[in-house]
Image: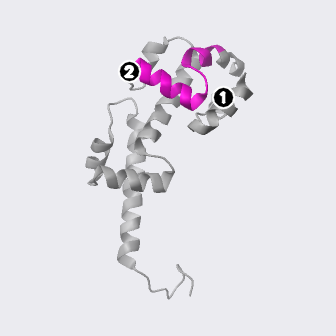
Amino acid sequence: MPRGTIGHVGNSSADEQRLRDLALLRRVRDRIDREYAQPLDVEALARGVGMSSGHLSRRFRQAYGESPYSYLMTRRIERAMALLRRGDMSVTDICFAVGCSSLGTFSTRFTELVGVPPSTYRHQARVTDGIPACVAKQVTRPIRNEEAPERARHLA
C-alpha cells in the first residue's frame, strides 16, 4: 500500500520525530517573525527549542528553503522596506529599528536582497505611493541574491 494509507506499517517513531521537529521549526519561524528586531542568533533560537544549532539550521533549511539567519534577515529587510516607503526615518534609524547593529552590513544585505541600496529604494518607492500597503508589500518583497540583478532591471 502507498505510504500514508490505512494499513501502512512504517517507521512511526521516525514519522513522529519528524512531526515534532516541524512543530519546533514553526515555533522558531514564528519567534523570528515576532522578534525580528531583537538580537537573535541561531544558537539562541536552537536553545529555545532544545536543538543544537547545526541540527536547527539543517532542518530549517530543509523545511523552508533557507537558513534561520537568512529568514531573519529577510524579515528585517521587509520591515525596513516598509519603513523606507513611509519616508519619515533615516536609513540609520531604520537599520537599528529592525534589529541590525551595523549600518554597513544592513546596507549590504539590503542591496543583495532588493537589488538597490536603501537610499535608492526610498527614492524609487514613490512608485508605490497611492496603492494599498498590502499590494505594495507583495510588489516590493525582498528576493534571493541570484534574483536581485534581474529585479533591479525591472524597477529601473
Q: Which residues fall within the magenta stretch?
A: 103-123
Mark linked to residue 136:
1
Which quarter shows the N terminus?
A: bottom right
Q: Nearer the viewer, residue 143 or 125?
A: 143
- Crowding near pointer 1: few (<14 within 10 Å), some, many (20+)? some
Residue 79: image location, x then y, percent: 50, 28
- Residue drawn where x is 63% and y is 27% of the image: 133
**First of labels 2, 1 by sequence position:** 2
Residue 104 on the magenta span? yes
Query: In front: mark 2 or mark 1?
Result: 2
Whole-number angstrom distance, CA of label 2 to CA of label 1 = 27 Å
Which quarter shows the C terminus?
A: top right
Q: How is the image coloured?
A: one colour
Residue 142 in which image quadrant = top right
In the image: residue 51, left or right of residue 77: left
Q: Which residue is mark 2?
A: 102
- Residue drawn where x is 40% and y is 80% of the image: 11
- Residue drawn where x is 61% and y is 19% of the image: 121
In the image: residue 73, left or right of residue 13: right
